Amino acid sequence: MHIEPGIVNGAKITLSYATAAGAATYMVKEAASAFGVSGAISLAVRSVMATAAAFTFFQVLPHFPVGVSEVHFILGSTLFLILGAAPAAVGLAMALLLQGMFFAPTDLPQYFINVTTLLVPLFALKAVANRMIAPGTAYVDLKYTQALALSTAYQGGVVAWVGFWAFYGQGFGAETMTSVLTFGGAYMLVVLIEPVADLAVLAAAKTMRGLNGSGLVTPRLYNAA
C-alpha cells in the first residue's frame, strides 16, 4: 500500500493534502466520540497500542514490492475490532510517519497519499460494520463470514485507492494498468489470511473477559451496541 516514489509527482501530489485532511477531520470526529465513551486515558493508551502494532505489521511482517506499490499485512480490520476506529486510525497514521522518519525516508513525500490509502478504507470498514453487525452482537461473537466481509471491505478499499493514485499520477496506459492489476491480485490474497487472524485474535480476546471495562480495548469488543 506504499505508493512507489515517482508515481504521483509535482502539482498532482497536492490532491493528497486535501484527501488526507478529510481523513484527519473524520479521525478527529471519531476520536471525540471515543473520548466521550471511554475517556482520554483509554483513547491514548489504545492509540499507542495501535501505533506499536501497526509499526510491527509494517516493519516485521513479510512485505514485498508488487507493481505500483507494496503488499503488506496491515491487519486493519483486526486493529478496528480490538481497539476501535479512532485508535486504529491514529495508530496507522503514526506508524506510517515513524516508518518514514526512521526507516524509509523516500516514502515521506508520499505520506499523505499513503495515509489516505489506509484511513479512508478504515472508515468505510466502520460503516460496513455498523450496517452488517447486528446491534446485539459483540465483536468477539463474529462469524467467519462477517470477518471475511470486513477484511474484504478494508483490503478492497486499499486496492481501490492505490489504483486511483496510480492512474491519477500516470494515466491509463497499458503499463500502469498491468502494474495496478498485478498489485491488486497480489494484495487481495491478504483477504485469505486476515479473517483467520481476526478470528484468532477475537477467540483469544474471548478468553480474556477481564479486559472488559479495562479501557485497553474498544467497548464493543465485549458488549452489544
Image (cartoon, rainbow, N blue to C red):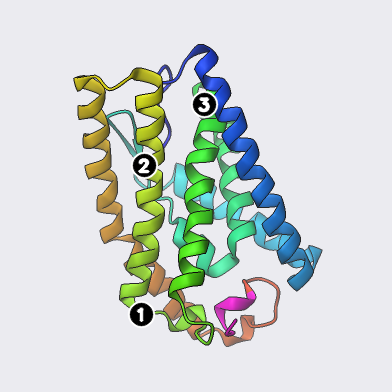
- Tell me how far mark 3 sits from mark 1, CA to CA: 36 Å
Q: Residue 143, labelled with which disc?
A: 1
The nearer-to-camera label among 3 and 2 is 2
Give percent across and percent down for residue 94: 62, 43
Single out the residue that lies furthest toward the top.
Answer: 10
Which region shows up in magenta? Answer: 219-225
Q: Quadrant of residue 216?
A: bottom right
Q: Quadrant of residue 15?
A: top right
Tell me the SS state at disc 3. Answer: helix
Q: Which amino acid is tagged 1?
A: Lys
Q: Which amino acid is tagged 2?
A: Ala
Q: Which amino acid is tagged 3?
A: Gln
At label 1, counting other C-alpha atoms closer than 10 Å, the crowd grade (few under 14, some 14-19, many 20 or more) is: few
Image quadrant containing the C terminus:
bottom right
Q: Nearer the viewer, residue 175 or 109?
A: 175
| Residue visible at 37% across and 51% down in the picture | 155
For disc 3, the marked residue is 110
Mark before the other along the chain sequence, 3 or 2 = 3
At label 2, counting other C-alpha atoms closer than 10 Å, the crowd grade (few under 14, some 14-19, many 20 or more) is: some
| Residue visible at 51% across and 32% down in the picture | 113
Q: Are marks 3 and 1 in contact (CB under 8 Å)?
A: no
- Tell me how far mark 2 sits from mark 1, CA to CA: 26 Å
Mark before the other along the chain sequence, 2 or 1 = 1
Q: Are marks 2 and 1 in contact (CB under 8 Å)?
A: no
Tell me the SS state at disc 1. Answer: loop
Q: Residue 160, labelled with which disc?
A: 2
Give percent across and percent down for residue 92: 56, 47
Image quadrant containing the N terminus:
top left
Q: Quadrant of residue 185?
A: top left
Q: Residue 112, labelled with which disc?
A: none
